[in-house]
Amino acid sequence: MPKGAKPEIAEEAMAVIGVVGLGVMGLGIAQVYAQAGHEVRLHDAHAPAQEAALQRLRQGLQARVDAGKMVAPEMAAIMSRLQVGPLSDLAPCHLIIEAIAENLAAKQSLFRQLETISGAILATNTSSLSVAAIATGLQNPQRMIGLHFFNPAPVMKLVEFISLPGTDAAALRLARSLTETAGKTVIACADTPGFIVNRCARPYYGEALALLEEGRSAGEIDAAMVAAGYRLGPFQLIDLVGADINLAATESLLAAMAGHPRYHVFPTLRAQVARGDLGRKSGRGFIYPDSLPPAPDDAAAIALRIEAMLANEAATILAENGSDMAGIDTALKLGLNFPRGPFEAARRHGLPAIRAELARLQAAAPDTLKPRYAAAAALEALA
Ligand SMILES: NC(=O)c1ccc[n+]([C@@H]2O[C@H](COP(=O)([O-])OP(=O)(O)OC[C@H]3O[C@@H](n4cnc5c(N)ncnc54)[C@H](O)[C@@H]3O)[C@@H](O)[C@H]2O)c1
């Protein structure tokens, strides 16, 4: 196929998918499209990862067969659609998804190579880099999109979908359709740091840390959120994912957002990481291994504070174009198992209550944190 050619395809079901980078995400993404009936071509630059890929996929599928969730012939059919080989084998692909290490220079270099090899739509699974920055230097950046899957990709329904100004409309349609047909809920979002979920979730942890620093206990804060319908409280969620991962995500967003106090890194989180109390993986976290106490008397006030901050962050994202209220709500429900999206939560409280809570928090905050609580203009969209 000539350089920059658009993939021609008679029937979408015939689309060949490429996956580069066969770690936890790449293998999961390969499984998603192979399960949907596509031929999937896989490549990893590191021989051990490349050699282990099919065996790892087989083990994952075998566990489903053993659990009665898949029949053996289906597993055999899926395995028959997966092929591992050199990067040049990805030439006939219609959509190639990159899930290599989170390194801008490595991703740029890979995509420059890929556009000379194949006419496919090129997609990155980056969590924290700008899709536009990854596309820098491409001869045909209009082929580049972001397809951000969540871990584990075969289980998590959400895919954040990032287009750039000038992205080819046919490429967008095909990538969206292939991914939706593979069973995913595709939510459009802007090419801004953290996209929707990883950014909008920040206040869930941040405001809980603020409360902790004001003297509340992690247990009562979490119990309040569980009483409000959340599956896990903020600290239980940090314990599950790892305080180090949460700190890295917050620091990366703070840097990308020019140090805005909405993404303030609370010292308590740094101290927790410095102590090595990372959560489940280290045997001790904010809550882990304990269970939660009963919800405190002011549980509803704690939930209002955290949900007001979630709604305010959602409103700042809304103002950036690319997403709508329903999409942001769906993303938070699917990406984080939240019982309701931030706009749905705000509607339950009512816009006046959200505004009053933000004003109260701003008045009480130290000067450096006052901008953290400034109401986003787009909150008006809720009125
Ligand atoms: N782990 C998650 O929860 C998660 C969720 C969403 C998105 N992501 C993103 O997905 C990407 C992959 O993450 P992961 O957790 O699967 O990483 P990983 O470290 O498990 O796997 C990365 C794989 O890429 C290979 N690789 C590295 N450089 C390469 C290159 N130049 N060419 C080909 N292969 C190369 C490595 O050998 C490795 O097998 C990252 O961009 C990450 O930010 C991760």
Image (cartoon, grey):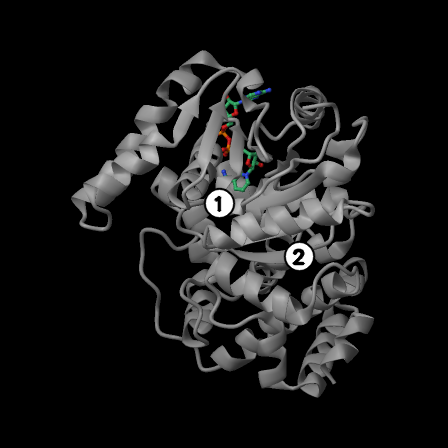
Q: Is mark 1 within 8 Å of ligand 1?
A: no
Please state the horizontal and vertical placement of residue 142, each as a whole percent of the image.
Answer: 78, 39
Q: Residue at x 57, y 26 (%)?
A: 92
Residue drawn at x 75%, y 43% is 256
- Residue designated by label 1: 13
Q: Residues within 10 Å of mark 2 (few under 14, many from 20)?
A: many
Residue 52 quadrant: top left
Residue 76 placement (x, y as % from top left): 26, 35
> Which mark is on residue 252?
none
Q: Are marks 2 and 1 in contact (CB under 8 Å)?
A: no
- Looking at the rendered structure, the secondary structure element under dot 1 is helix
- Dot in front, 2 or 1: 1
The quadrant of the rendering that contains the N terminus is top right
Please provide percent x and percent y for residue 316.
75, 64
Local crowd size for mark 1, using a 10 Å CA cut-off: few (<14), some (14–19), many (≥20): few
Mark 2 near ligand 1 (CB under 8 Å)? no
Q: Which mark is residue 188?
A: 2
Q: Is residue 366 visible?
A: no
Residue 48 visible to an observer of this rendering: yes
| Count of number-bearing discs | 2
Three-letter residue code for mark 2: Ala
Q: Quadrant of residue 337?
A: bottom left
* Three-letter code, disc 1: Ala
Which sits in the foreground, 266 or 248? 248
- Residue depicted at 27% across the width and 32% down the height: 59
Mark 2 or mark 1: which comes first in sequence? 1
Q: Locate residue 56, reporting x and y percent.
A: 33, 28
SS class, disc 2: strand
Nearer to us in this view, 233 or 88 = 88
Residue 119 to residue 69: above or below:
above
- Residue 252 sits in which quadrant? top right
Q: Is residue 335 above or below residue 116?
A: below
